[in-house]
Amino acid sequence: MRLSERRHMVDYAKTDHGVSERRACEVLSIHRSSYRYQRKERARLPAYQAVIEQSQRYDYWGYRKIQPLVTAQGYQIGREQVRTIRAREGLQVPEKKPKRRRSGLSSMDIDRAQYPGHVWSYDFVFDRTEDGGTIKSLTLVDEFSKVSLDIVSGRSLTGSHVKGALERLINRWGAPTCIRSDNGSEFVASQIKTWLKQNKIGSYYIEPGCPWQNPFIESFNGIFRTTCLNRWIFLNLEEARREIARWRQEYNEIRPHGSLAGLSPLQFLRNFRRDNPKFNQMRMPTP
């Protein structure tokens, strides 16, 4: 049992059962000085409580994501301090098992996006509602800014749905130079290839069975599944769409991204366009 858990048990024994602090600490094997020190530290350091509040609000984010949120509130606190506080309070995110890299092309062997709107990626993610119905979500990401362009969810999505989503996004963001995807039937359909050619948009199809050739959308889909789909049981499709839309807004506007210097995707995009006015290929979204 962690120190923070024993401290909470001491609080419980004192308030709910009238046990003395001395006796409670003795039973739970915690020094009274340690018990009191933790309480004094939280009271003395306002940032401590800010870390707890943000960690509880975004319980699926690690300390690297929480630290920029706390500093944005005006507190000077480092990553290691945030990590220590979260460890004391039992707020860590369970560690993921490391993934094995398969042999083949790495992301460095693939042309990387050089500016916003250069390369988009799309893919499908599957889940189920409580009644067993399928949720099929089309995820679309700008590879350079990591902005989630859209997530379209339905019971069944075809090439026509993919085309409609692309048309809406081009009207909102402008056309990309290239779109990267796997060889799913919805992406290699003749109507999609024809439409891309008509709009002068290049297509990059990864080799079959090589998801590591499309690392940006794979990373996004992993975050989407871990912090959204795996957190909630959806009663129906409409509830799933509402929660996915809320999650997407949080991802774009709030969630710090490690490869974007701790900025959210939209913050990074705004800063990039401010500092590089010649790159206007990608419009900012309308409200």
Image (cartoon, helix red, strand yellow):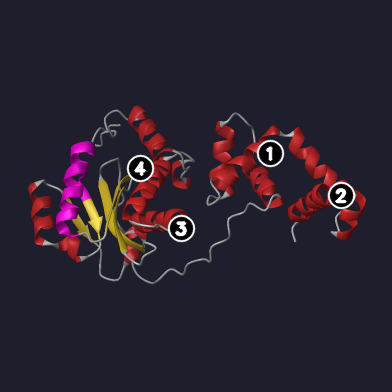
Residue 204 visible, this orientation: yes
Q: Which residue is mark 1?
A: 48
Q: Which comes sooner in the sequence, label 3 or label 4?
A: 4
Q: Which residue is mark 3?
A: 226
Mark 2 vs mark 1, CA separation in Å: 28 Å
Mark 3 vs mark 1, CA separation in Å: 26 Å
Q: Quadrant of residue 25?
A: bottom right
- Image position of 200 (left or right of 285): left
Mark 4 vs mark 2, CA separation in Å: 56 Å
The one of 150 and 101 positioned closer to us in this rendering: 150
Instruction: Find numbered disc 2 in the image and state the secondary structure of the residue it sits on.
Output: loop
Quarter containing the N terminus = bottom right
Q: Which residue is mark 4?
A: 145
Residue 87 position within the rendered picture, expressed as x and y whole percent measured from the top left: 68, 52
Instruction: Find numbered disc 3 in the image and state the secondary structure of the residue it sits on.
Output: helix
In magenta segment, residue 165: yes
Q: Which comes sooner in the sequence, label 3 or label 1?
A: 1
Q: Main secondary structure of the magenta part?
A: helix
Counting labels gives: 4
Q: Are marks 1 and 4 in contact (CB under 8 Å)?
A: no
Quarter containing the C terminus = top left
Residue span colored magenta: 158-178
> Residue at point 25% right, 32% down?
280
Q: Which residue is mark 2?
A: 18
Rendered view: 207 above or below 70? below
- Image position of 98 (left or right of 273): right
Please state which amino acid type lies under the numbered disc 1.
Tyr
Q: Which comes sooner in the sequence, label 2 or label 1?
A: 2
